[in-house]
Amino acid sequence: MAEQAETSAAGPAPSGGGGSKLVMIVALVNLIATLGVIAVLFLAFQKEKAKPTVEDMVLDDKGHGAAASGGGEAKKDDHGAGGKDSKAAPAVSDAGKIMALEPFTVNLSSGLGTSPRYVRMNVSVELEPGVPDAEFNIKLPRVRDTVINLLNSKKATELNAPEGREQLKDDIRRAVNSFMLQSKIKGVYFTNFAISN
């Protein structure tokens, strides 16, 4: 009887560590998945870093792109030849200086019996090429007041439609250009636009 108790207490012999093999396989799969995610994130970062920014484009237009980008390469002309003897063709750009305005949070026009709604938006304006921005900076409070007054006159239903937002851009451009002498606006861009519910 004592012998039976000893053999039953000892139980069957271990089967060779099947559980530890499963843990190793799961750990290996987890490691491979983690390395894959890291590789995808790294490639996405490299791709994003390689995209030219607005500053790069502006510097390229002024002829300082090769030195400013840190590439150290000689600028190439249309034929692809680089070096001392080649002369780069002058860059022609129709882009003006882009001025970002402070964010706007403005009440919209609402009828009787409707709950008040507001718009939050970020606006950037593009000045005509070659015009100085000094006048624009001096008249910035008037520019902001004009945008706020235009927004106060709009209803949420108007601005929810793409045509309404395009009309607002045109209204802003015309209203601001009406009091600018030199710093005329070429384009208006919404970089953020949200209407409350």
Image (cartoon, rainbow, N blue to C red):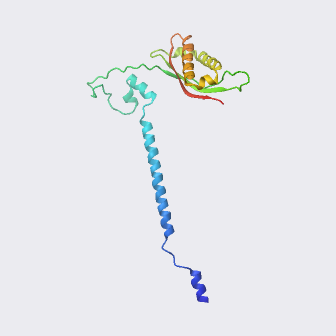
Point 50% across, 67% down: residue: 20
x, y (%) of residue 58?
43, 24
- Dividing the picture into quadrants, the one containing residue 150 is top right
Q: Nearer the viewer, residue 110 or 8?
A: 110
41 sits to left or right of 106: left
- Dividing the picture into quadrants, the one containing residue 135 is top right
- Dividing the picture into quadrants, the one containing residue 176 is top right
Q: How many marks?
A: 0
Furthest-left residue in this view: 85
Point 47% across, 48% down: residue: 37
Q: Quadrant of the N terminus?
A: bottom right
Furthest-right residue in this view: 113
Point 49% across, 59% down: residue: 27
x, y (%) of residue 127?
49, 17
161 sits to left or right of 95: right
65 sits to left or right of 122: left
Q: Nearer the viewer, residue 74 or 15?
A: 15
